Amino acid sequence: MATETVAKPKTSARVHVQRFGTFLSGMIMPNIGAFIAWGLITALFIEKGWIPVPALGGFGTNAAGAPNVGLVGPMITYLLPLLIGYTGGKMVYDVRGGVVGAIGTMGVIVGAGIPMFIGAMIMGPLGGWTMKHLDAIWHGKIRPGFEMLVNNFSAGIWGGLLALLGFYGISPLVTAFSTAAGNFVQFLVHNGLLPLTSIFIEPAKVLFLNNAINHGVLTPLGIQQSLEQGKSILFLLEANPGPGFGILLAYMFFGRGAAKASAPGAAIIQFLGGIHEIYFPYVLMRPLLILAAIAGGMTGIATLAVTGAGLVAPAAPGSIFAVFAQTARDSYLGVALSVLLAATVSFLVASVILRTTRHSDEDDLSAATSRMEELKGKKSSVASTLTGAGAGGGVGVLTGPIRNIVFACDAGMGSSAMGASVLRNKIKAAGFPEVNVTNASIANLNDTYDVVVTHQDLTERAKPATASAVHVSVDNFMNSPRYDEIVELVERSNAEGTAAPAAGAATAAAPGVPAAAAGTTGAGTTAETAAEPETVAAPSDILVPESVVLAGSASTRDAAIDEAGQLLLARGAVDEDYIRAMHEREESVSTYMGSFLAIPHGTNAAKDHIRKSAVSVIRYPEGIDWNGKQVKFVVGVAGVNNEHLHILSSIAKVFTNKAQVAQLEAATSVEEVLELFGKVNA
């Protein structure tokens, strides 16, 4: 029952609407560049544009007397809906779903004869979803050699049927909906009621429900209106940066503590960068400030309506630069006044609220930011600007319990896997087995982690992909003192978190789903398997006696890398290019791990040169200088998928135990070395 209680908020109506809005946004946002291109071409080359060109703007006739087609009409009628349909299908069923979704979208386009953005949002995902389920029917039942034939014809036949469905079935329904919605908008405009939409839009923005409204209704209707009138007021109902900017200005003058100190930076990000979510925590700290956002939004919309101003295409993100770039030729004054007056009214209302209510903002900004992320359903990429998380190379400030930690290196193969194993054991020993500690290559990182641990030379490379995480830099992965700091941070953050589960409990998993599965972060199979290396079945030939040398002949770092690589080559595990890649990896970032251990391995790009997983172990009793560190054990690593993670975990456990390291130094036989590493090939 406890698990169900935790899960219920995640299935609320608000969350479902958020997910729906996120899905709609996912179809529109990747194609915003195409919308911007269409908007610029429209603003420049139509008959009322800055540089009227009949052949490009689609007005007048050519030398033969035929009407000019231009770029504007075909782009809005065909290109943009097809891009949306393809993207929607691809989101559901990769490229195959995208192709079928685009075919179905073409039927809606031709059937309606008007820009079919809503139709594309229906046919794209529908094409991907239905194709996915059709493929499942004959999956594994196709005779070898006939796969391409069946796949191509099934996609073609089903895509054709969907095009017919779109032509005869979907297009009339969408046309009727678009007409009704357009009439409703016109009713609001003609009766002076359009500003009232701010009563819904501004709170929806703070609750992250705006995508369903903006990308699901306003953008498609705005495009249709822009095509007919050359501009649309609808593009600025949600994207106007004025209301949020006014609230942040009020905090700059009348706020207190951390909120006042961070407001200037947040204002720059919001107004110039167009990332509106940066001001949401400031509203959540003082919920009454939603009145300031509504007042500013209503003022901006009213100004647009009075001046007859609008944009020619969506402004995304909602930066002042994007707004002016998409402003219609006759609307610059109206749009400028809209932003200015919206910011002014929002500032005045927010100032009154801030000055007349007693409140300390010093300790509440982090809590409000955490609340914002809970509403959003994921970590915010700009939250670090408010809380300090992710800044610098040390342990920063978190807005909630730590659930996911990733070790990242260039290849995600050796050093990061061992570091993850070491820290995982420390965190489990501290009583937090539910914390997911994984490893991944930097190329596969995404912004879903709470803490990112990297070698100090790689931290700057990891930050762009994980902007909202706390970044910890270490000089070695085996025994860094930073690990104790991370454990303390886990203890502190998870003790403060209201939903921290007891040791051994599943974390926010659905009934019947193990904790390990619930903690999956999407970093790929490597990360998932690394979370519980003891469950990985290691092939019996990854480490064999022939790959263990008790007295290596090398006297330098590079020679030791060659010696370890040659053992892998002799096993048939790698080719010569992989050994060269081991040297390249060492030149970029040292593979020294601490505790007299180095684990040279290839770069991420060299994985194609690995034929099978293998590990070599060489001992150098006198030690080798490894970039100023003494190394007595060199472990060469070549890993396919996750087959080597089990043995690396065993090696890591040995080298974090000083007594076992001493036994390795004193070992007189290969069997003793293998025994100390444990039955890693079992």
Image (spheres, rainbow, N blue to C red):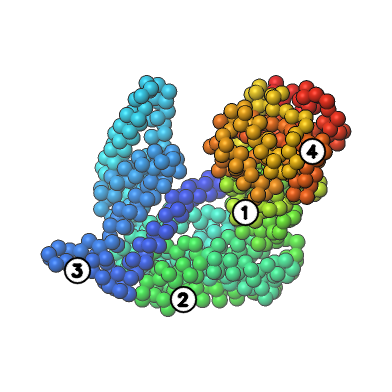
The residue that appears at 50% across and 64% down in the rendered structure is: 318
Q: Which residue is mark 2?
A: 336
Q: Which residue is mark 1?
A: 461
Q: Earlier in the sequence, mark 4 or mark 3?
A: 3
Q: Which residue is mark 3?
A: 60
**Relative image position of residue 345 (x, y in whole percent):** 55, 75
Q: Is residue 432 left or right of residue 530?
A: right
In the picture, which quadrant includes the C terminus? top right
Label placed on residue 632:
4
In the picture, which quadrant includes the N terminus? top right
Q: Is residue 570 left or right of residue 320?
A: right
Name the residue nearer the viewer: 294 or 607. 607
Q: CA distance from mark 4 to mark 3?
A: 81 Å
Instruction: Tell me the kind of residue under disc 4.
Output: Lys
Mark 1, secondary structure of its residue: helix
Q: Earlier in the sequence, mark 3 or mark 1?
A: 3
The residue that appears at 12% across and 65% down in the rendered structure is: 65
**Relative image position of residue 574 (x, y in whole percent):** 58, 33
Choose mark 1 or mark 4, whichever is in front.
4
Instruction: Tell me the kind of residue under disc 1.
Output: Arg
The residue that appears at 66% across and 73% down in the rendered structure is: 252
Q: Are marks 3 and 2 in contact (CB under 8 Å)?
A: no
**Relative image position of residue 221 (x, y in whole percent):** 37, 58
